[in-house]
Amino acid sequence: VREALNDIAKEPNAAQMGKGKIKDKLERRLQVDGINAAITDNLVIDKQDGKVLIVLKYEKRVAVIGNIDFVFKFDEQVK
């Protein structure tokens, strides 16, 4: 996920892309990598000083046994 975010942020025309275009590119990339694209619901895209800032925060819980869960947190931002 981190690599996909970095790749999109480093594209030469990233600052000119609309938010929808950036989200679509990320969803396609995640789908190719076999990652659930629903995480992009937590995507925040902002443009600052001619650069694009992409922030993605999400949490995934996986039940292990009874009331014990594994919790995976992802919090990344790229410019």
Image: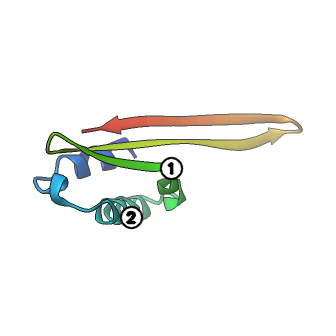
- What secondary structure is found at the residue carrying circle 2? helix
Q: Which mark is residue 42?
A: 1
Q: Is residue 38 left or right of residue 31?
A: right
Residue 45: percent from left, percent from top: 35, 49
Disc with the residue nearer the chain's start (1 vs 2): 2
Q: Residues within 10 Å of mark 2 (few under 14, many from 20)?
A: few
Q: Which residue corresponds to mark 2?
A: 32
Report the Cα–Cα distance between label 1 and label 2: 19 Å
Residue 17: percent from left, percent from top: 21, 61
- What secondary structure is found at the residue carrying circle 1? helix
Amino acid under label 1?
Asn
Q: Quadrant of residue 38?
A: bottom right
Residue 37: percent from left, percent from top: 49, 60
Q: Residues within 10 Å of mark 1 (few under 14, many from 20)?
A: few
Q: Is residue 13 left or right of residue 56?
A: left
- Whether 59 is drawn above or below 17: the answer is above
Residue 75: percent from left, percent from top: 46, 35
